Image (cartoon, rainbow, N blue to C red):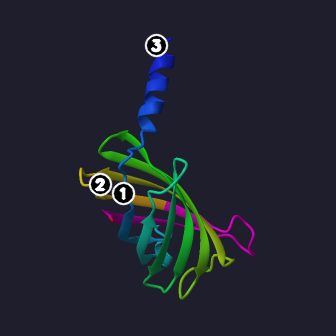
């Protein structure tokens, strides 16, 4: 019985959502295709996360560009989970348009990104953290090599 109560308490504390959340502008940089040393590049990302949602999921829209002229413009959803008031874990999913530039050919212009963010949240709602993601076309293209990206970011409340 104690285990059930502890599990229920943990689930409610993790899914705590603050009513006074603000919209966030994410600015970040990191390593694109970090698992393959021969085709790495520096990635830059700008993303907007809206506080407006009727569900727990927040809409996101963003774009990233690399030093190899790869471009990914996307839209999706994110779920903010708060194990405590100053730490955020946010799994997210997005779909968007990918242009390979001088970088990796992912096999199709429509690409899907799944990722997770871990961040420290300050009292002014600014966040600093890291986001790791995997991008692939879910085998709808002629090939599906995928790529992994890690971005270090600053999220500014607006």
Residue at x 69% of width, y 77% of height = 108
Stretch of the chain drawn in magenta: 133-157
Asked if 29 appears above or below 92 in the picture, the reply is below
Q: Judging from the image, what secondary structure is the residue with disc 1 in?
A: loop
Q: Residues within 10 Å of mark 1 (few under 14, many from 20)?
A: some
Q: Residues within 10 Å of mark 3 (few under 14, many from 20)?
A: few
- Would residue 129 be found to the left or right of residue 138 on screen? left
> Where does residue 105 sit, x and y in percent of width and height?
62, 80
Viewer-nearest residue: 138 or 145: 138
Disc 2 and disc 1 in contact, CB within 8 angstroms? yes
Q: Judging from the image, what secondary structure is the residue with disc 3 in?
A: helix
The alpha-carbon separation of the residues under discs 2 and 1 comes to: 7 Å
- Give the farthest residue toward the left: 123
Query: Which mark is on residue 2?
Result: 3
Query: Which residue bears the numbered disc 2?
Result: 125
- Would residue 8 be found to the left or right of residue 151 on screen? right
- Would residue 41 be found to the left or right of residue 137 on screen? left
N-terminal label among 3 and 1: 3
> Where does residue 2 sit, x and y in percent of width and height?
46, 13
> Where does residue 75 sit, x and y in percent of width and height?
56, 68
Residue at x 37% of width, y 67% of height = 25
Query: Which residue bears the numbered disc 1?
Result: 22
Viewer-nearest residue: 126 or 131: 126
Residue 66 picture quarter: bottom left
- The main secondary structure of the magenta stretch is strand
The alpha-carbon separation of the residues under discs 3 and 2 comes to: 34 Å
């Amino acid at each position: 019985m104690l285990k059930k109560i502890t599990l229920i308490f943990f689930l409610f504390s993790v899914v705590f959502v603050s009513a006074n959340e603000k919209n966030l502008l994410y600015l970040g940089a990191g390593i694109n295709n970090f698992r393959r040393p021969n085709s790495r590049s520096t990635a830059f990302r700008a993303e907007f996360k809206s506080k407006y949602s009727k569900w727990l999921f927040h809409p996101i829209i963003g774009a990233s560009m690399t030093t190899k002229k790869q471009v990914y413009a996307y839209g999706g959803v994110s779920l903010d989970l708060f194990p405590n008031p100053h730490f955020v874990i946010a799994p997210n999913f997005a779909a968007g348009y990918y242009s390979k530039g001088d970088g990796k050919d992912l096999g199709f212009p429509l690409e899907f990104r799944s990722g997770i963010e871990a961040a420290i949240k300050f009292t002014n709602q600014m966040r600093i953290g890291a986001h790791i993601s995997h991008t692939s076309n879910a085998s709808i293209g002629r090939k599906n090599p995928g790529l992994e990206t890690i971005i270090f970011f600053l999220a500014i409340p607006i």
